[in-house]
Image (spheres, grey):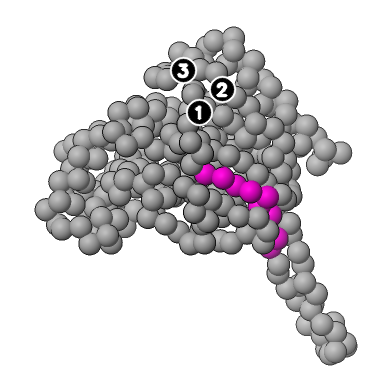
Amino acid sequence: MSKGAIKIAVEGVSKVYRTEKVEESFVRRLLPSRRDTEIQVKALDDISLQIYEKEFVSIVGPSGCGKTTLLRIIHGLIKADNGQVLINDQQVTEPKPECGFVFQDFGLYPWRSVIDNIAFGLELQQVERAERMERAQHFIKLVGLEGFESSYPHQLSGGMQQRVGLARMLAIEPQVLLMDEPFGALDAQTKRIMQLELLRILQVQSNANTVIFVTHDLEEALLLSDRVMVMTRRPGRCKEIVEVPFSHPRDEAVMDTPEFIALRRHLWQTLREEQTEVIS
């Protein structure tokens, strides 16, 4: 893809989690003056990344390497210990309305119907009811849920619930879409359908989003993305950024090409190096 303006700049981001180690009670009785010790876990170490406007970037890496932590720092849900994140040249210090988050667990409100779940973000923005219902209906159509407006989450399949979650986020028209393994809990067939639906939705959206997508699925990353960032084992660093050369619009036929197969093999070998070093 042709690169436009930089939308998101991650600059030297590091994060350390600190917890207290509490001694066993019998030790505390024998040595009452003994202090609890602090345990430090370095999750991220000096990550830098530039993401361009309307670009789709996936992040892959070993379990526990800090992918979700990085996504939450970009959103402003947690703060980095070092470094900074800029969106539209503005430093991120808290969640912003132009940045939407889609979680793996759907996060739907069970007491709200499909249309009311989708309209929830608009309600928080104090959009008038008539307008938010109209916009919610537009996104119901966009994600293929017409006829289910009055249904409740427990009446929907997992794939349909994730469509509601995606529609709810798109309805607030975020400039940046952060997605944390949104299809990870779905069965293989539904997952593939949702991947292709996401490609279709982003293609027809009038206000195309910049997307950062966390996944463990290498095929998913290559099918959806313009670039893939590979992270090291903890503490997470940027090991490599892989350019995905396939043009848009894109469908699953690309997965049968020699280029796709070679890229998948390369990503797997790169990640296996990290896993092998942990095991050895």
Q: Are marks 2 and 3 in contact (CB under 8 Å)?
A: no
Quadrant where the C terminus is found in the figure = top right
Q: Are marks 1 and 3 in contact (CB under 8 Å)?
A: no
* Residue identifier under label 2: 244
Point out the residue furthest to the left here: 130
* Residue identifier under label 1: 3
Specify whether residue 101 is in view: yes
| Highlighted range, magenta | 8-17
Q: Nearer the viewer, residue 115 or 201?
A: 201
Identify the residue shown where x is 24% and y is 52%: 119
Q: Earlier in the sequence, mark 1 or mark 3?
A: 1
Identify the residue shown where x is 53% and y is 51%: 86
The image shows residue 40 at horizontal and vertical percentages of 76, 64
Q: Earlier in the sequence, mark 1 or mark 2?
A: 1
Q: Residues within 10 Å of mark 2 (few under 14, many from 20)?
A: some
128 above or below 144? below
Q: Please give left or right for residue 182 compared with residue 135 in the image.
A: right
Q: Are marks 1 and 2 in contact (CB under 8 Å)?
A: no
Q: Nearer the viewer, residue 88 or 136?
A: 88
Indicate yes or no whether the magenta region holds residue 20: no
Q: Nearer the viewer, mark 1 or mark 3?
A: 1
Q: Secondary structure at mark 1?
A: loop
